[in-house]
Image (cartoon, rainbow, N blue to C red):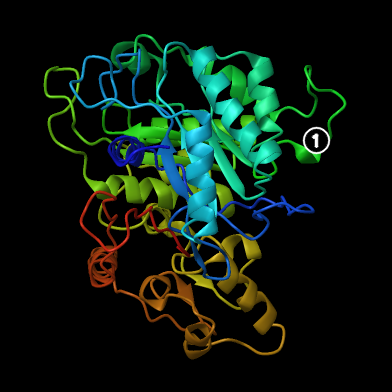
Amino acid sequence: MLDERRLNILVDAAKYDVSCSSSGSKRQNTKNGIGNACFGGLCHSFTPDGRCISLLKILMSNDCCYDCAYCTSRRSNDVPRATATPEEICELTMGFYKRNYIEGLFLSSSIFKSPNHTMELLYETVRKLRKEYNFNGYIHLKGIPNADKLLIERTGFLVDRMSFNIELPSEKSLKLLAPQKDKNAIITPMKMLAQDKYFYAPTLRRKDFLPAGQTTQMIVGASPESDAHILKLTEFMYRTYKLKRVYYSTYTPTNFDTSLLPYEQAPLIREHRLYQADWLLRFYGFTADEITGTDGFLSTDYDPKCAWALKNPQLFPVEINTASPEMLLRIPGVGVKSAYRIMQARKHAKLDFSDLKRLRVVLKRAVHFITCKGKFLGGANERVVKNLLIGAELNQNAKQLSIFNNYDSAVFSAITGEL
């Protein structure tokens, strides 16, 4: 049985991995099985219907043979070490699930002895959970770069989601801060997970392979890359590797013995802006080049959509009653749902500002970029508009929350919404 000391070490070491979101998996229960991932998801995340769901988030081992400068589990760091066996992870997961503490498992690990040895232990854990413990709940597993392709593929048929973390936004930074890691070793399994055919299990069905897809994570602030660089990489990975999400994690200083890393944490607002920009890439039809400023960084004063609209005054104000669906989505304060409501409502009558408020348009932002029936109620000039947008942002307390502060919940993830 996994004792309390080792459990505390492995759970604490897992807190730096933020690859958690609602699952999107459709794995249903089977006869005599335990658990169901169909309506479940990940720890401290919210499903579309508003439910908060929980996940056991743990490392199998923090006894790492690599020495990545930014990682608390690096070989040269003097921290308590612990390793759990597959049986111990399985017993812990089932015990927590039966007590209704969790609805799934997020399992990761440091590189213990070697990539293949670590991946074998992870595979054996999820195999036991599925085949011996009949657990059909949600499982997100962090894959191990440089592990055997057969192990990775077989694991993909057992878990709901897998992630290979890109770690740092450029190959140069990866070589500098994590010399034992290789860009191609990370990219190769991501390519494999995105393909439609399998070399090692050609008889198995595609729908049984990673039903919730794959994700990745980048550390922000440990290396000097700009937001433009990060978002272009993000855009490329969404397009090429069919990723469900890219997660951004603000670097938390844990290594003060090297001049290669900053001694202060990057502003959390930067991570928040990256999540907002990521939202625009995925749902609003923006490109990375459109979103980032001339200096390559996102504005900290207001969200990326507002910043884009201010850079393109020739496109505004937009008449809300005649604008195309694509243009509606580019108006600050108008989200995907409110754009759809506007399209439906204006079929029956001309809309005014009071109508937009009922349709849940964020008028504090939108009013500066639209007209209703030819009427404009926005700021008199660009300077006034900027000040009003900054004021609206401050009033909404729009800031990224740290996952390490002492809040009631153990983890806060970046909150994005309708922009």
Mark 1 = which residue?
A: 206
Residue 135 image point, x, y percent: 65, 46
Describe residue 349's horizontal placement relative to residue 121 as left or right: right
Query: Viewer-proximal residue, 254 or 313?
Result: 254
Q: Is residue 228 left or right of residue 399?
A: right
Q: Is residue 120 above or below residue 3?
A: above
Q: Is residue 377 visible?
A: yes
Say few, some or many: other residues with alpha carbon within 10 Å of mark 1 (under 14 / 14 to 19 / 20 or more): some
Q: Quadrant of residue 47?
A: bottom right
Q: Nearer the viewer, residue 280 or 85?
A: 85
Q: Secondary structure at mark 1?
A: helix
Query: Which residue type carries mark 1?
Result: Arg
Judge left or right: residue 161 versus residue 231: right
Question: Residue at image x 63%, y 34%?
Answer: 128
Tell me where residue 173 sits by quadrant.
Answer: top left
View extreme (right): residue: 203
